[in-house]
Image (spheres, rainbow, N blue to C red):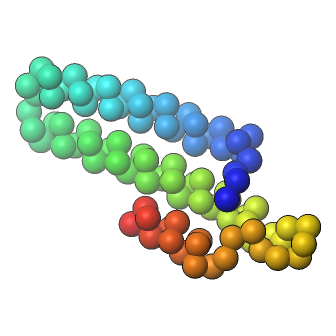
Amino acid sequence: MDVNAAKLTDVLARLKRVQGQLGGIIRMIEEGRDCADVVTQLAAASKALDKAGFKIISTGLRQCIAEDENGSQRVNEAELERLFLSLA
């Protein structure tokens, strides 16, 4: 499933924020910060990654459900289901 990068600028921004969050989490662990604070930040980063994944899949769905030049769907239902479940 190929996804149009121009339609995912918000996803790229979200992933860059997550990248910064992960750096912060690493520093928190290295500094011996409270476990609850670290886990809270991990949960926030995880949720942001999930949202990015769902956005990528939903954007891709619009492209994949459309038929290609041969009249067949680019990705079948089983493949789409597998992608969704991989984020669960």
User: What residue is shown at x 61% (from left), y 40% (from top)?
Assistant: 10
User: What residue is shown at x 70% (from left), y 42% (from top)?
Assistant: 5
User: What residue is shown at x 49% (from left), y 31% (from top)?
Assistant: 16
- Left/right placement of residue 41 relative to residue 3 reads left
User: What residue is shown at x 25% (from left), y 30% (from top)?
Assistant: 25
Q: Residue furthest right?
A: 69
Q: Is residue 20 above or below residue 53?
A: above
Q: Position of residue 59 (x, y in %)?
A: 67, 57
The quarter of the image holding the C terminus is bottom left
Q: Quadrant of residue 57 in the image?
A: bottom right
Q: Quadrant of residue 36 in the image?
A: top left
* Viewer-proximal residue among 51 and 85: 85
* Viewer-proximal residue among 69 and 49: 69
Q: Is residue 88 above or below residue 13?
A: below
Q: Position of residue 7 (x, y in %)?
A: 72, 45
- Left/right placement of residue 66 relative to residue 41 reads right
Q: Is residue 81 above or below residue 57?
A: below
- Left/right placement of residue 20 relative to residue 52 reads left
Q: Quadrant of residue 35 in the image?
A: top left
- Count of numbered labels shown in the rendering: 0
